[in-house]
């Protein structure tokens, strides 16, 4: 089996994703999964540097994960956690 390069990236779920997130990251994430082994994560408590209301944080994690899938990240091609 040929070794692929590995990509690892995470996104903080601090609010709704915007056009900048799409153009700067998510669009590239989708392209990269075609060529490389990719691991993408929605970081939560261990990476949050300011207080987050727990209920809002939980909702933001789910919305960010849904955005990953909606933009074309494929769980069969990339590891998403």
Image: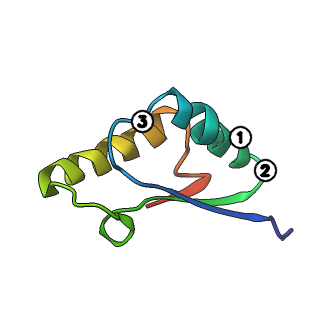
Q: Position of residue 49 (x, y in %)?
A: 34, 65
Mark closer to the chain start, 3 or 1: 3
Which residue is rendered at x = 45% and y = 30% of the image? 18
Q: CA distance from mark 2 to mark 3?
A: 25 Å
Q: Which mark is residue 31?
A: 1
Do the numbered discs 3 and 1 sit on residues whose CB atoms are within 8 Å? no
Q: Is residue 12 left or right of residue 29?
A: left
Do the numbered discs 1 and 2 sit on residues whose CB atoms are within 8 Å? yes
Q: Which residue is mark 2?
A: 35
Q: Which residue is mark 3?
A: 17
Q: Position of residue 65 (x, y in %)?
A: 39, 47
Q: In the structure shown, which secondary structural element does the residue marked by tag 1 occupy?
A: helix
| Number of marks drawn | 3
20 relative to 49, above or below: above
- In the image, farthest residue toward the front: 50
Which residue is rendered at x = 21% and y = 56% of the image? 52
Which residue is rendered at x = 67% and y = 41% of the image? 28
């Amino acid at each position: 089996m040929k070794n692929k390069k590995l990509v690892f990236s995470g996104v903080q779920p601090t609010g709704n994703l915007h056009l900048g997130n799409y153009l700067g990251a998510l669009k590239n994430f989708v392209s990269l999964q075609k060529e490389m082994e990719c691991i993408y994560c929605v970081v939560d408590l261990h990476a949050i540097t300011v207080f987050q209301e727990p209920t809002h944080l939980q909702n933001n994690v789910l919305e960010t994960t849904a955005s990953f899938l909606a933009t074309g990240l494929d769980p069969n091609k990339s590891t998403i956690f």
